[in-house]
Image (cartoon, grey):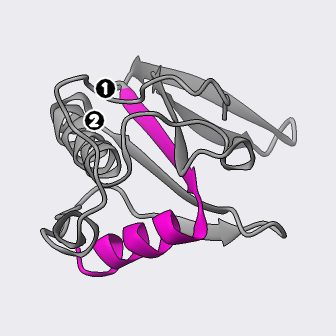
Amino acid sequence: MASTGVPCGSDSIQGGSSEHLLYGSFMNLNYLDFDYSENTDGTGTFDAMASVSPSQLANVYAEVEQVLRWAVQAFGADCGAVEDGFAWNHDLQAQQEYTVNEHPVFDPASGRVRTQQGKAGVPRHTVTLSISGSAEFCEALRTQLESA
């Protein structure tokens, strides 16, 4: 994650760490399922990945927006590396993949497997979101996610 220290959210969203923002209004997530890890200096990281069809992509981005809006509202829009003094940081990536079904057939005469390609399928969109943060940030985000 880049340690840019630049605003991570909209200028119209004001930061602050009130109890309501930290422990109130819980998230409702259906696509993002976060795994948590922690390094030796206490920085925690939440990682989620969703791989969806085009019809579901807007729902995934709505969940990403919900999580990042919460982070900006609860801990402020300035984010960067925790070791540089920031409360949180994030890395958001996406890619679109097309798949082609293959039809493998074993040929007993030659002893080899041969494949025939089918038509290209519907594209899949894979979105990954990693959020790292201080112990306080991670505790607050964990509370949000456990109540989702």
Q: Quarter of the image containing the C terminus? A: bottom left
Q: Distance between the residues labelled 2 and 1?
A: 7 Å
Residue 122 is tagged as 1
Kind of residue at badge 2: Ser
Closer to us: 121 or 47: 47
User: Are the residues tagged 2 and 1 within 8 Å (C-beta)?
Assistant: yes
Q: Percent position (x, y) of residue 97?
A: 48, 24
Residue occupied by mark 2: 53
Label tally: 2
Residue count near mark 2 (Cα–Cα under 10 Å), binned few <14, some 14–19, many ≥20: some
* Label 2 residue SS: loop
Residue at 18% from the left image edge and 33% from the top image edge: 58
Residue 32 versus residue 145 in the image, above or below? above
In this view, the residue in front, 119 or 96, is 96
The 10 Å Cα crowd at callout 1, few under 14, some 14 to 19, many 20 or more, is few
Q: In this view, does 16 lie to the left or right of 92?
A: left
Left or right of 107: which side holds 16?
left
Q: Which of marks 2 and 1 is in front?
A: 2
- Asked if residue 79 is positioned above or below residue 21 in the image, the reply reads above
Kind of residue at disc 1: Val
Question: Measured from the top left, where is residue 124 in percent x and y?
Answer: 38, 31
Q: Which of 37 and 4 is in front in this view?
A: 4
Taking the spot 36% from the left edge, 43% from the top edge, the residue there is 76
The magenta span reads 124-148
**In the image, is residue 127 part of the stretch drawn in magenta?**
yes
Image coords of residue 37 (percent x, y): 66, 69
- Given residues 97 and 134, the one toward you in this image is 134
Does label 2 or label 1 sit earlier along the sequence? 2
Quarter of the rendering containing residue 102: top right
SS class, disc 1: loop
Tell me the quarter of the image containing the N terminus.
Answer: top right
Residue 92 disc label = none
